[in-house]
Amino acid sequence: MNCFESAPSRQKKFTLAAVYFLVLGSLLISSTDTVILPIIAQELNGMDYFALTKAFSSVTAAVTMPLFAYLMSKDPSRKRNLFIFGAICGALNIFTRTIATHMFVVVGGGILNGFLSTAVYVVGYTMVRDIYDAKSAAKYLGYVGTINSLGVLAGPLISGVLIDNMGWRFVSHIIWITILISAILMVNGVKVTKEEAKPLAVETGTSFDFSGAVFQTLFLGALTLFLALGSSLAPFGGRTSNIFLALTIVGFIGLIVVIRKKGDACIIPAGVMKDRNALVLTIDSFLMNFSLMAVYFFIPTFILYVLQGSATQSSLATTLISVAGLFMAPVYANMIGKDGSAKRTLTIGMIIRIAVLVAFIIVLGPKTKLMVIYVLMFVAGFYQSQHAVTMSVAPQIQLTADKRMQGNAMIQVTMALGSSIGTAIYSMIIAARGVATGLRISFVIAAVAAVIVLIVSQFLTKVQEEDAAA
């Protein structure tokens, strides 16, 4: 039993509650930003560049996820402080919105929000695994899937009713207070010293990999801006977009050179990239998010522009995909914990995903009944909840302790890239072929991605408990 597991039960409960509150705060941001940010931009005359807010947040998250993982792997006792720092940054981001008098303040706050994402997905999830054994951690992380579903279901209510009646500032105050509560809870959470955590540290015998950090920042930062702004401020094919693309290529080549030269001393250790489970889960996370965007993002578009449906009918489709997660998330999590592997849940989820995509390819057309789409979106919730649970639980269960933090960071970064690249590709296809035809083509591509995930997932191997908890 390590120093985190042997901590007092009361401290463990505070840590777990802190993670849940931060997950909730993060979901409240993502579910209300699509409404709140345009309102703020209109009030502050910043419609031309409010898209930068989310872009800067994505850049910060992409850069800090591997960086925080590196810092935690060198000294696991830093996790608590990094979590608190990320939560405070997230709270400050939302609080500054409520007092902002210029859009640049809001855009700049987006940089802080990236730290919050890292605190949740890289720091928080690993802390839950640290303080509990594999089966218990899987169970508690499974509840994250339920919280995710609740967040998506409650999002439209908060975005609509509360903002209309109480104003966006009132909602923002609720969000930053929720996030701040998570930081306060973590202050009372599990705390270990550097000496106590030393047996869990990953030692390379070298100093901080500065060159690797620079190339990693250049690669992920430029790629994120290239994708995030490609349909708005920096259109694909334009000068600015091409500059981002060139910087992405330079950063990628530089990072590969550093990895080959420094091996495990690199900020992204070569050993993590060669680990079978880490590699499989990284491929899966990218392709699952890539595939997901075709349904989650564009079915509402189809309802609006092809079926001429209302905004309410469109939003109901995305609401239905979250219903299954309320009761299936714990089931999938317990399955992973019991099996010690995500292979079975991934297989089940991908079969359902492929079946839903094929059904959409067959039935989708100008005369498709809304009820048919709603039924398929409800069924899609069974693979969506598997998707969310797997990416929160599997890295903590299937990666050995020495690779868990940096492997999880790599997985979380590729999830975001999968979403961005998928959205960009599907948008270009739909723009070129129209919504009806373009969406069918997009579903074919998404189904192929799901088939690849199904095949690749069969190579996952079970990690022995002593290796996982070492």
Image (cartoon, rainbow, N blue to C red):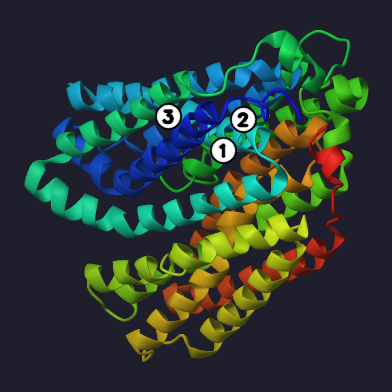
Quadrant of residue 341 within the rendered picture: bottom right
Return the residue at label 2.
65
Is the Cβ of the residue at disc 2 closer than 8 Å to that at disc 1?
Answer: yes
| Residue type (three-letter) at the residue carrying disc 2 | Met
Residue 247: give x, y in percent of width and height.
65, 29
In the rendered image, residue 457, in percent from the top left (x then y), is placed at 78, 62
Disc 3 versus disc 1: distance between alpha carbons?
A: 13 Å
* Between discs 2 and 1, the one toward the N terminus: 2
Rendered residue at 23%/35% (across/down): 174
Q: Residue at x 73, y 64 (%)?
A: 453
Identify which residue, 311 or 434, lies in the foreground.
311
Q: Secondary structure at mark 2?
A: helix
* Quarter of the figure with the C terminus: top right
Q: Is residue 58 left or right of residue 347?
A: left
Residue 56 in the figure: left or right of residue 331: left
387 over 165 or under it: above or below: below
